[in-house]
Image (tube, rainbow, N blue to C red):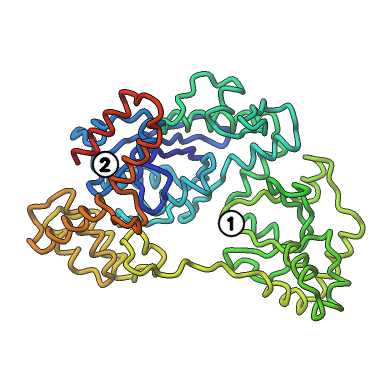
Amino acid sequence: MFIFYDIETTGIDIVHDQILQFGAILTDEDLVEVDRFEIRCQLLPWIVPSPDALIVTATPVGRLEDASLPDFYAMMQKIAERLAAWGPATFIGYNSMRFDEPFLQRAFWQALLPPYLTVTGGNARLDLLPLIRAAACFRPGLLNIPFGEKGAPSFRLDGLAPANGFNAHRAHDAMGDVEATLFLARKIAQGFPELWGPLSMRAPKAELTALLGSGAPVFLFRHGGTPPVTCYHRIDKGYGRGSHAVLAQLGYDWTSAKAKIDSFKPGESAALRKALHRIALNKAPLLFTLSEAEAIAGLTPEAAELAQAEFLAGDSDYCLRLTEMVAPFARPEPIAGAQVEETIFDGFASAQDEQLMAEFQLADPPEQLMIARAFSDPRFRHLAIRVLYVRAQNLLGERELEQMRLGIRRRLDGDEAGGHRWRSISDAIAELEANSERTPTVEELEIMTWLINR
């Protein structure tokens, strides 16, 4: 099963902005629609939306505070319930690895829900944008790729979908973008099954790990690479355990490098490191077996590349040394004075706090208050108090209310010196005033008035 999904947000800051709308379509393995779901929510009281985002998504300011809409936390709970009922499945978005995925993870976390729903419980994820780019590279003419203002090919969904016949596209509407993404996926599946078949089925980490664990060379597609498709061999020995893999480009002379690696000049050392590539196994990188690469693009490894693969496979100590030259994934350093949204990677929840989160989702507000005060991790206490501030302020103590009010005022007002990391009201007004050389539109005037009165 596949779940095509999209989000619309208050801006592009995955840490401090908020999801306002979510849309998803469940399909079977043949991309036939089985079910669909969409939902919209109210604005959180401490979020200042980007005026540009409101205009692009055609969201009137009155809709942000529409009392008929669920609050953010109720929306995220409904999303989690529907996606859990639909799974296990492969989640597919458009440019989702860079935007929708991290946004969704943080939204679940802030709502005290399991954040990694799309990669746990048998679920996997796939980004359609790299597949579209690969299709354009391997099968020119399959898709009509429009050109941007600078004359370069443009892969923006709002231009690509209509250029290929999807004329009903409601661009920058969550369900509209889901429908456009599904339309393009069907174009690839039907017109280029040699590409769609293996890559869509290999989205789960276990499938990709098994492929790399065979020890055979693989081809990797990287948009913007020179060339875009290169033959590699996995050199780390974390098969089946790690979240990443280290690949060595077989066009590089690893045999000669071994003898002189300790006397490398800076340029030579940089060239060696450039020939090593670290991939995330749960982000569905575009890897092809030798037979797939030949069928898709007529690519076959050269004899010298196969010789390099054989050499690396026979020297585990050398491969270990090369692996250690690749910078490991580093989590961000804690931020002094961080807002709670910025602390998602400051540690996993304890088993006890995870249990309390599950109970919190099922409890009524008075019980939620008791649970909120029982969390051992202050981050989760803070997040729980936020939920109650939105839903049941009357239950909070005067100190908790005052802390929330001060925090919200600080978020809205920002720092006069501009040191804050989020969008304040003055930042949003400045965004509007950047277009002051022309007469403001009705939408811009409405947004300006709403911001001034907040």
Residue 326 to residue 193: above or below: below
Name of the residue lying farthest toward the front = 437
List x then y, in percent, for residue 191.
Answer: 69, 29
User: Where, quadrant-wise, is the C terminus in this rendering?
Assistant: top left
54 is higher (above) or lower (below) than 294: above
Q: Residue at x 25, y 72 (%)?
A: 376
Q: What's the residue type where badge 2 is placed?
A: Leu
Per the image, the residue denoted by label 1 is 205
Q: CA distance from mark 1 to mark 2?
A: 35 Å
Tell me, yes or no, whether the two marked residues, 1 and 2, touch with CB atoms within 8 Å: no
Left or right, 337 with respect to 275, comes to left
In-front residue for pair 79/329: 329
User: Which residue shows up at 71% across the image and 27% down it?
Assistant: 142
The answer to whether residue 1 of the structure is visible from this angle is no
Closer to us: mark 1 or mark 2? 2
- What is the crowding at mark 1: few (fewer than 14 residues within 10 Å), some, or many (at least 20)? many
Quarter-of-image position of residue 295: top right
- Which residue position is annotated with label 2? 43
- Give the quarter of the image for residue 31: top right
- Name the kind of residue labelled 1 in the image: Lys
Left or right position of 44 against 16: left
Q: Residues within 10 Å of mark 2 (few under 14, many from 20)?
A: many
Describe residue 167's horizontal placement relative to residue 322 as left or right. Answer: left
Residue 421 location in percent, x, y? Answer: 37, 56
Secondary structure beneath disc 2? loop
Indicate the position of residue 59 as horizontal and vertical percent values: 33, 30
Foreground pick, 348 / 229: 229
Circle nearer the N terminus (1, 2): 2
Q: Is residue 441 above or below residue 253?
A: above
